[in-house]
Image (tube, grey):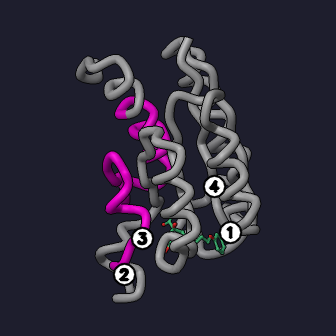
Amino acid sequence: MHSILILNGPNLNLLGTRQPEVYGSETLADIEARCRDKAADLGIELAFAQSNHEGTLVDLIHESRGTHAGIILNAGAYTHTSVALRDAISSVELPVIELHLSNIHARESFRHVSHIAPVALGQICGFGSAGYLLSMDAMLSHLTQKPPS
Ligand code: CA2
């Protein structure tokens, strides 16, 4: 059975409390519950984590090697700043899907830069919380080399 990690970065613990027009009204716990339902449907194991700390995110990426088959990463604002996260992703040699709730390319110019994108399998953004579920389909498709049904 494949195991995947969905990893969330800074401030995503605040989902559902502010800026619903940008990030939706669901909490991160709501999204996790939907991901867990989908993981059961897909027959995969799911780990789901959030941290506001860059070093903790780096540690969790390192620890994924040998534990998880792939990582879905919403690195939040660290997407646009963190060479450390990029290097961690390169070092573990696991497929990583970069995920964002909002369409970062349609927002402020500083959000158009991603240090994750060059080392990611691909990027899903702009679909709100549905992006988490789409990313799970994309990851399983990649891991099994089958198109999503
Ligand atoms: O769209 C995304 O998923 C982002 O990764 C979210 C980050 C942002 O810095 C990225 O550019 C795009 C911000 C997450 C902050 O989430 C909040 C949720 C509620 C209230 C305040 C912040």
Which numbered tag is attached to residue 115? 3
SS class of the residue under badge 3? loop
Q: Is residue 40 above or below residue 137?
A: above
Structural crowding at the residue carrying mark 3, measured as other residues with C-alpha within 10 Å and reported as few (<14), some (14–19) or many (≥20): some
Residue that carries the numbered disc 4 in the rendered image:
8
Residue 83 screen position, x and y as percent: 51, 73
Distance from mark 4 CB to nearest ligand 1 atom below 8 Å? no
The residues bearing labels 4 and 3 have C-alpha atoms spaced at a distance of 16 Å
Say which residue appears at 59% left-offset and 30% top-offset: 68
Structural crowding at the residue carrying mark 1, measured as other residues with C-alpha within 10 Å and reported as few (<14), some (14–19) or many (≥20): some
Q: Is residue 95 above or below residue 128?
A: above
Q: Is residue 85 above or below residue 89?
A: below
Amino acid type shown at disc 2: Arg
SS class of the residue under badge 2? loop
Magenta stretch contains residue 115? yes
Mark 1 or 3 closer to N-term? Answer: 1
Amino acid type shown at disc 3: His
Quarter holding the C terminus?
top left
Distance from mark 2 CB to nearest ligand 1 atom below 8 Å? yes
Marks 4 and 1 in Cβ contact (< 8 Å): no
Amino acid type shown at disc 4: Asn
Q: Quadrant of ligand 1?
A: bottom right
Mark 4 or 3 closer to N-term? Answer: 4
Query: Is residue 84 visible to us here?
Result: yes
The residues bearing labels 4 and 1 have C-alpha atoms spaced at a distance of 7 Å
Nearer the observer, 144 or 43: 144
Nearer the observer, 45 or 14: 45
Residue that carries the numbered disc 2 in the rendered image:
107
Q: Nearer the viewer, mark 2 or mark 3?
A: 3
Say which residue appears at 47% left-offset and 77% top-offset: 80
